[in-house]
Amino acid sequence: MDRVITDGGTHTAEAGVTTGVLARRLGVSPTTIRSWDRRYGLGPAHREGGRHRRWRAADIAVLEEMCRLTATGVPPAEAARAAMAPTRPGTPTAPGAGDPAAPPPPTPAYPPDTVPAPHGRVVGSGLPLGDVRHEARGLARASVRLDSAAVQDLLNSFVREHGVLAAWEDVMMPTLHAVGRKWQSSGDRYVEVEHLLSWHVSTALRSAPLLRPCPVPPPETAPVLLACLPDEQHTLPLEALDAALRERGAATRMLGGAVPAEALTAAVRRSGPSAVVLWSQTRSTASVPLARELGRTQWGVQGARHGPAVLVAGPGWGRRGLPGLLRPHGLGDALAMLSGAGTTAPPARRPEETG
């Protein structure tokens, strides 16, 4: 007989798993699962004595589909009918199911199993999301149950429909922050959730030009150079800015995390950027002298030399402005400061030709 290993112990595949074990796997609360059983008949096909629920593979598949559908905004009653239809003969399907001309189901303000609870908790994901879009709630639940396919599909769909700026500020960043807060307060739990979510957020951002039509910058466009300071590994905010700039037709050069100071200087001289964006997550990685040195780097013919604008982004730089440096607060602010940057022609001679 096959045996199934779960975080709740070892079970035979025939015996099934408990509601608590299944709830942790799906990233919803046990109360939600019991409610779905009472309201929509999504309970296990077999019960032990005393009406204890034991969930087998076929039962779990139905609930996984229920989670996937409600995460995309399908009302629970319709999601339940659709989830049961493929596995339980005779189950009525949702109105209009299978009819390509049928209108899409309405999107609720919140998926019904993720109604905001007191103190900012969200019943269903276990993450402190607060007042956010329902897409963020669906993303949180898919992330907690480590459903890679659902996470990527939700991210790609939102980028495609609403663009990078809205995706980052309304969905990606709130969910990432909620996972981070949960990880910090739960003693090394949810680290795997943070890693999985970060990976798929990065994938969606890098795929943004394929998800939405983007203008192509002219070949001689001066780029915007983006880099993390030496010893700084947090790249996701820079990746969001890079994707948003490319979405607007700007040329960019992304250097990624922990770029050595010498490499930064060399990249500025070689590429002749219109602007340099330096990201620092913590005060220990921020370097005002390096930022100012890059701002003083110049190139061009005698009498017409110029250098880049330097934006210092991220919480590591503090809240106050720094003389001679631009200090954006958030992705939208950075985009406003860079409006027009990376879209004008560079000097007639490349920087490496003039030293």
Image (tube, helix red, strand yellow):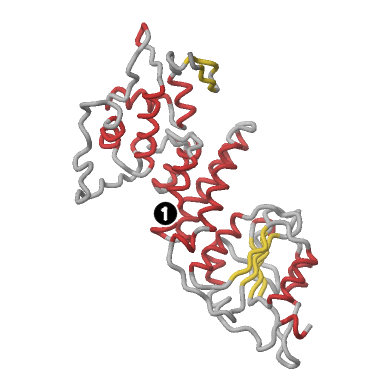
**Rendering coords of residue 70 (x, y %):** 35, 39
* Residue nearer the viewer, 285 or 193: 193
Pointer 1 residue: 158
Is residue 34 found left or right of 186 in the rendered image?
left
Please say if 154 is above or below 297.
Answer: above
> Which residue extends farthest top?
49
Please say if 30 is above or below 295.
Answer: above
The image quadrant of residue 265 is: bottom right
The mark tally for this picture is 1
Residue located 73% across and 90% down the image: 301
**Rendering coords of residue 247 (x, y %):** 49, 67
Is residue 70 found left or right of 155 in the rendered image?
left
**Rendering coords of residue 327 (x, y %):** 63, 67
Is residue 237 found left or right of 114 in the rendered image?
right
* Residue nearer the viewer, 321 or 173: 173
Residue located 56% across and 53% down the image: 202
Please say if 298 is above or below 56.
Answer: below
Residue located 31% across and 42% down the image: 74
* Residue nearer the viewer, 101 or 241: 101
Is residue 76 found left or right of 227 in the rendered image?
left
**Rendering coords of residue 227 (x, y %):** 68, 63
Q: Quadrant of the C terminus?
A: bottom right
Residue located 73% across and 57% down the image: 258
Name the kind of residue labelled 1 in the image.
Phe
